[in-house]
Amino acid sequence: MKILIADDHALLAQAICDTLCRSPDFEVTTCYTLQGTLDEVNATPHDVVLLDLRMPGMHGLASITDVVARAGDANVVLFTGQVDRQFVDDAIKLGVKGYIPKTMPLKSLEVALRLIQTGQTFIPHIGSTAAPQPDEKRAPLTDRELHVLRLAADGETNKEIAREISNSETQVKMIMRNICMKLAARNRAHACMIGRERLLI
């Protein structure tokens, strides 16, 4: 089985590589950036691509779409720490074959990889940060809302955000209210946390 580990944590990637390569069943390559990953999947076919969500160049679902498109028949799997279940579901709709948490024991990792190679989707139990709303299709955040959410996550006050986007504090409060509604967030801080987990910011 040809495995590509795309993760900028070199020590972790190498440790997993060394462990898997003890078995003659695995051939492992490592990459540390999105561009390096895209170049590798273009040049060489793989069975499974373990894709870290926070390595250099990654921008959420857009980058995942690029990797899936270029990976051909390879099974692309999210390989990261804690992640929001809604984000995983969205990624699967794009062609991702599951999610492997970095906390998974190495013995279990081998089992998961073999399952994925057979065409199965692997998803361990994931808690959701947002309150479940199965019957509601939440609208995506607009570019302006994403910009405001990023500024809020950077610690800027409403007054500072208003100055940044050339608008009033009242308008900023309304935008934040819309953001919280769309993300089913309890408050501003919760919205920022959800935004980070879904890799929106």
Image (spheres, grey):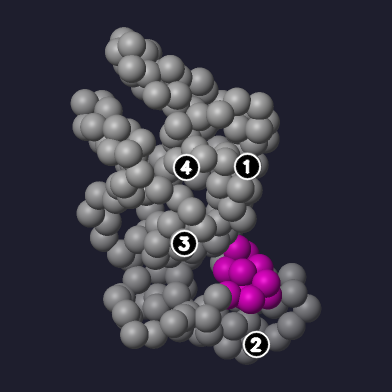
Residue 18 % position (x, y): 37, 13
Q: Quadrant of residue 84?
A: bottom left
Q: What SS does tag 1 mark?
A: helix
Horizontal and vertical percent for residue 120?
31, 46
- SS of the residue at dot 4? strand
| Amino acid type assigned to the residue bearing label 4 in the image | Val
* Residue 55 visible, this angle: yes
Q: Position of residue 17 (x, y in %)?
A: 40, 18
User: Magenta region: which residues?
Assistant: 141-151
Dot 2 and dot 1 residues touching (CB under 8 Å): no
User: Mark 1 = which residue?
Assistant: 70
Residue hosting label 4: 76
Label 3 and label 4: CA atoms lie apart by 12 Å
**Mark 3 element type:** helix
CA distance for labels 3 and 2: 34 Å
Is residue 142 on the magenta stretch? yes
Quadrant for the C terminus, please.
Answer: bottom right
- Labels 2 and 1: the sequence-earlier one: 1
- Residue ID for mark 2: 171
7 with respect to 82 (left or right) = right
- Type of residue at label 3? Lys
Q: Nearer the viewer, mark 2 or mark 1?
A: 1
Tell me which label, 4 or 2, sits earlier in the chain. 4
Circle 3 residue: 93
Q: Earlier in the sequence, mark 3 or mark 4?
A: 4
Would residue 177 be found to the left or right of residue 132 on screen?
A: right
